[in-house]
Image (tube, rainbow, N blue to C red):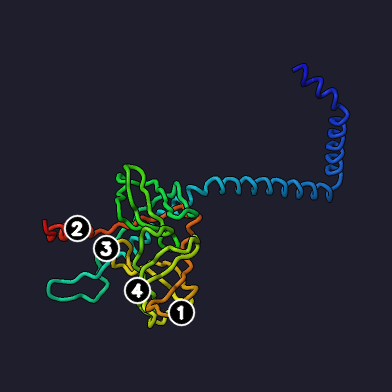
Amino acid sequence: MRDLFRFLYRIRNALLFVVLIALSFALLSSGNAHHRAAAISSSNEAVATIFQWRKEITDYANLKEVNRRLAEENADWRNRHSSSYTPVEDLYVRINDTIHRQEYSVITAKVVNSTWHKQKNFLTLDKGATGGVHADMGVVGSDGIVGVVREVSPHFASVISVLSPDIKHSVQVRRTGHFGLLYWNTNDPRTASVIDIAKHARVQVGDTVETRGGDRIFPAGVLVGVVTEVNVQPGSNYHEILIELAEDMTRSTFVYVVKDLQRAERDTLEQAHQVP
C-alpha cells in the first residue's frame, strides 16, 4: 500500500493534469448545447465501438459451436438427399414415383489429426465404434470425398486419405459416363490422377469427375474434382487425366462418414455363397 501511495505521489502532476482536462471538458459541455451534443455523440460512438468489439470477440469464441451445429445440419441434409435413397420396386409392378428407400446415411465427425505432405496420408476422426463407425466406410467433406475408414477404436477412427496411393476409388466423368479409378500419384495435395479411361473417350478440360457408386463405399454422384489436363502418351490406350480435387485436404475440420444401410444384408448374402 505504501508503494502505491509513493507511485501516485510521483505522478501527481500527471494526475492533476488529467483531472483538470476532464473538468474542463465537463464545464465546456455543460455550458454550451452544441458542445454537449457533440460530447454525447462521441461517447455514444465510443460505447458502440466497445460493444461491437465485444460482439466480435463473442462470435469468434462461439465459432466452434456454430461449426458443430452446421455440420449436424449438413449431415441431416445429406441423409435426406436423393443420392442416399434407391427406388423401391414392388413384387409385381415398378413404381416410377417419388417413393424411395434410404440406402445411405451419414455420421458427423471432426478431424482431430491429419497429414497431407507425406507419401501416404491419413486422418483421425473423433468418432469410433461407439458412434457407429466401422472399417471400409467412406468419408466425405463439405466439397468432395476425403477417404475411407481403415481402423476404428471405441472413440476414434483412422482414415486412409485420398492423398494416398494405397487406395483407388471408382469414379466417372459426369458428362460422358466413362469411368476409371482415382489414383494419387502427383505428390500434390490439390491434385490427383484418373486412370484407366480409354483414349477414345472424349474427356475435356473442365469436365466434372464424381463417384461412380459401384464400390458401395460412396453414393453415386459425390463430387471428386474437375479435369485440368488430358494427355495421351504414344502407344498407350488410356488417357492421362489430371484433376483438381474439390475438397481441400489441407484444412478439413468436420467430415461426414457414409454408412451403407444395406451392407449387412449384402455381406451376409455374399458370405453364404463363399466356398469353404
Q: From the image, tell me which residue sits under label 2.
A: 267
Q: Earlier in the sequence, mark 3 or mark 2?
A: 3
Query: In the visual, does 265 lie left or right of 39?
Result: left
Where is residue 138? Give x, y as percent.
34, 58
Q: Nearer the viewer, residue 75 or 20?
A: 75
Residue 204 numbered mark, or none: 1
Query: In the visual, does 68 lie left or right of 61?
Result: left
Where is residue 150? Give x, y as percent.
33, 52
Element marked by disc 4:
strand
Q: Earlier in the sequence, mark 4 or mark 3?
A: 3
Q: Nearer the viewer, residue 55 or 213?
A: 213
Residue 242 numbered mark, or none: none
Element marked by disc 3:
strand
Q: From the image, tell me which residue sits under label 4.
A: 179
CA separation in Å, label 3 and label 2: 18 Å
- The amino acid type, in three-letter code, at marker 3 is Gln
- The amino acid type, in three-letter code, at marker 2 is Asp
CA separation in Å, label 4 and label 2: 25 Å
Element marked by disc 2:
helix
CA separation in Å, label 4 and label 1: 14 Å
- The amino acid type, in three-letter code, at marker 4 is Phe
Decide: marks 3, 2 in contact (CB < 8 A)? no
Where is residue 62? Give x, y as percent.
52, 47
Q: Nearer the viewer, residue 197 or 271?
A: 197
Q: Nearer the viewer, residue 64 or 275?
A: 275
Decide: marks 4, 2 in contact (CB < 8 A)? no
Of badges 4 and 3, the one in the foreground is 4
CA separation in Å, label 1 and label 3: 34 Å
